[in-house]
Image (spheres, rainbow, N blue to C red):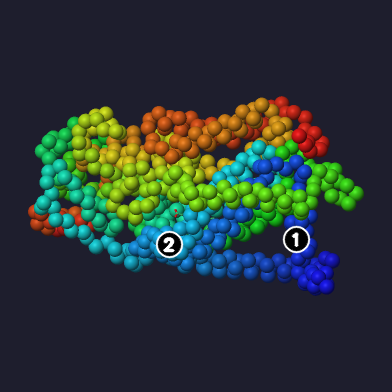
């Protein structure tokens, strides 16, 4: 009976075939490790953000007069409103934490190398969209931080030579940040960007399933297949990966709920304290600092204190900051190594990867504290090492001595 | 199964070309309202009414803030002492003579104002638009070991002197703008209009 019903559907819509191709029979390399969990957790967080976002929308008011009060209303008077909101703010931080881990995994195992270049580019697009989502969402509560972060970040466009000022007015829709700006950021945050994100994530997964997963050894599992054409070093996604993914989701949600229930402010990192004051267009807070996930780039922006080639320091800072986010997309073409995984790459690749991680964390710290001459100098140094990882890669990845890569995956 | 190639390829090519051109023109045309609607609306354009400030009670050394077009305008009444400071710091300023067009002609003078004891400044940092803070005191501050009084921007540390002139070596490139303004009476300052003397 069930088979009959299923067949009726399958003749009209490829349900079983799609499920098998993308889920149950998807061949996953047997040596996947904990780093491979971030992807599925990102999808979980996407669902959390969509749900909590839509529920916030039911009580949020996108006007300069009403936005701040409506958030307080959600927090105090709407039943369970505070949980919905904390879910969304915790979700935003979790999203970024996971996407950074996910990207780092790709960098370690050379997952951007042929044939996964496009998969990497599409993934980078989701990161870009997420950055925009985070920024537009941050403005919505219309607190002091919302207002002045929007003011500073949008003013960056005004630094573009020749047409910057006009572009800035066009983006703001006003001669300064105002309710008009809030309204359009709101439309982007709740409709356009989430829609785009869903589409891009969908394409990301399609691309993954076309080329197959990489693995910690960076070897091509499709080289050795059994008589049915199934790669030897893989196992079907169901039940093997589904089981450990479910387990990971459980652990993740325990962690997530701990923050959401007990540390919703995350010590001022998940929700910044200054944002508990309503936006005041006449008074800038003493320290304006972006959300933690942008601080490395904010440090880069501040590190550029000198004009160069006739371009103002302000514009250069903007360019460097944008480049810091953009440069990931070039990785597939910067890496000239014949080896994928860091396990078998030479010493230079290892050193530069470690340097990159250190730079990222140091910049992240510096972007979250007030600047001083010494800190600026340190930020300049680590901005240079951050970019060195990428820009010197064509050289060091080509000329280093790599270890021999095994034919089959290694299980330790 | 491959579909049969069309019998007259020249014709197909022409049709595809022609429809692509029409389509591209259509897309360009459709983009106009979408892009145009992001420009400042009539409401935003109209919000420029002048602001009026009663400065009769402003004491020397004090500052008041009024809002004009949504931006903070700082009105500072200088004390004799700080007026004497005005030339003390010139070598640290990037544009001490107010050469860049950051003020109306009638404020293009040493004090950047119509009346030397009163500064009227648009408090929008020329770096990234934060509102600089007023630090009238002299001497050592958190951010300067020999401060001559003026404005300090908390966002990225730009410094301006009491007349709103920017220091060199800070992120902000220009002096704080002086908005159009005039005195209706001695104690009544109108911001946003040049008055008759303009
Ligand atoms: C998908 C990734 C998303 C991210 C990373 C994200 C991020 C954020 C952030 C950082 C805030 C500011 C929170 C605060 O400080 O209070 C915010 C607020 C908000 N978001 Fe999202 N968001 C996402 C998706 C969505 C979606 C899909 C919707 C609705 C369909 C939505 C609706 C809202 C609303 C109404 C607010 C304002 C309420 C509040 O501030 O708590 N968001 N979002
Ligand atoms: S906005 Fe004033 S220093 Fe950057």
Q: State the separation of the CA atoms marked 1 and 2.
A: 39 Å
Mark 2 packing: few (<14 Cα in 10 Å), some, or many (20+)? many
Name the residue at 55% across, 50% down.
Answer: A256
Name the residue at 79% across, 48% down.
Answer: A235
Label 2: which residue?
A74
Residue A22 vs residue A112, the one in the foreground = A22
User: Where in the figure is residue B91, as x and y percent of width and height?
Assistant: 25, 30
Determine the secondary structure under disc 2.
Answer: helix
Residue A31 vs residue B38, the one in the foreground = A31
Q: Chain of mark 1?
A: A
Q: Is mark 1 within 8 Å of ligand 1?
A: no
Q: Is mark 2 within 8 Å of ligand 1?
A: yes
Observer able to see residue A316: no
Name the residue at 47% across, 36% down.
Answer: A365
Label 1: which residue?
A19
User: Where in the figure is residue A87, as x and y percent of width and height?
Assistant: 51, 55
Q: Nearer the viewer, mark 1 or mark 2?
A: 2
Quarter the C terminus of chain A occupies: top right
């Amino acid at each position: 009976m069930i088979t009959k019903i299923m067949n009726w559907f399958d003749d009209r819509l490829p349900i079983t075939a799609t499920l098998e191709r993308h889920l149950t029979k998807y061949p996953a390399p047997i040596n996947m490790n904990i780093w491979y969990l971030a992807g599925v957790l990102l999808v979980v967080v996407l669902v959390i953000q969509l749900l909590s976002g839509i529920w916030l929308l039911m009580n949020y008011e996108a006007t300069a007069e009403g936005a701040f009060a409506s958030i307080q209303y959600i927090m105090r008077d709407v039943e369970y409103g505070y949980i919905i909101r904390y879910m969304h703010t915790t979700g935003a931080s979790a999203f970024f934490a996971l996407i950074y881990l996910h990207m780092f995994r790709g960098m370690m195992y050379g997952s951007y190398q042929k044939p996964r270049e496009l998969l990497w580019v599409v993934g980078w697009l989701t990161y870009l969209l997420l950055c925009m989502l985070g920024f537009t969402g941050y403005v919505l509560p219309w607190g002091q931080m919302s207002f002045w972060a929007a003011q500073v970040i949008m003013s960056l466009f005004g630094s573009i030579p020749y047409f910057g000022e006009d572009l800035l007015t066009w983006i703001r829709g006003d001669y300064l940040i105002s309710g008009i700006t809030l309204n359009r950021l709101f439309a982007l945050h709740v409709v356009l960007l989430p829609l785009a994100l869903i589409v891009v994530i969908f394409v990301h997964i399609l691309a993954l399933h076309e080329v197959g997963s990489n693995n910690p050894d960076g070897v091509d599992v499709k080289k050795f297949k059994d008589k049915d054409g199934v790669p030897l070093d893989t196992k079907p996604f169901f039940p093997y990966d589904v089981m450990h993914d479910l387990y990971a989701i459980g652990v993740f949600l325990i962690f997530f709920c701990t923050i959401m229930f007990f540390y919703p402010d995350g010590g001022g990192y998940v929700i910044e304290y200054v944002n508990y004051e309503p936006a005041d267009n006449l008074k800038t807070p003493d320290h304006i600092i972006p959300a933690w996930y942008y601080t490395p780039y904010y440090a880069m922006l501040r590190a550029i204190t000198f004009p160069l080639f006739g371009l103002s320091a302000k514009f250069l800072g903007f360019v460097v900051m944008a480049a810091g986010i953009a440069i990931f997309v070039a990785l597939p073409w910067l890496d000239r190594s014949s080896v994928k995984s860091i396990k078998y790459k030479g010493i230079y690749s290892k050193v530069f990867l470690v340097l990159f991680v250190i730079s990222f964390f140091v910049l992240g710290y510096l972007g979250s504290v007030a600047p001083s001459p010494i800190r600026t100098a340190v930020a300049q140094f680590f901005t240079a090492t951050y970019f060195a990882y990428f820009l010197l890669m064509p050289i060091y990845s080509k000329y280093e001595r790599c270890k021999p890569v095994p034919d089959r995956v290694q299980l330790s | 199964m491959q579909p049969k190639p069309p019998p007259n390829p020249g014709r197909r090519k022409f049709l595809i070309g022609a429809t692509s051109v029409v389509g591209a023109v259509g897309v360009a045309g459709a983009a106009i309202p979408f892009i145009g609607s992001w420009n400042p609306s009539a409401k935003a354009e109209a919000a420029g009414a002048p602001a009026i400030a009663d400065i009769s009670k402003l004491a020397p050394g004090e500052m008041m803030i009024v809002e004009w077009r949504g931006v903070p305008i700082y009105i500072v009444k200088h004390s004799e002492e700080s007026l004497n400071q005005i030339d003390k710091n010139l070598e640290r300023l990037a544009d001490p003579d107010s050469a860049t067009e950051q003020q109306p002609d009638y404020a293009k003078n040493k004090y950047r104002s119509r009346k030397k004891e009163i500064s009227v400044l648009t408090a929008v940092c020329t770096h990234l638009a934060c509102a600089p803070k007023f630090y009238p005191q002299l001497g050592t501050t958190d951010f300067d070991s020999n401060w001559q009084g003026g404005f300090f921007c908390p966002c990225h540390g730009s410094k301006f002197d009491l007349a709103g002139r920017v220091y060199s070596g800070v992120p902000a490139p220009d002096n704080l703008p002086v908005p159009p303004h005039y005195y209706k009476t001695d104690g009544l300052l109108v911001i946003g209009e040049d008055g008759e003397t303009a």
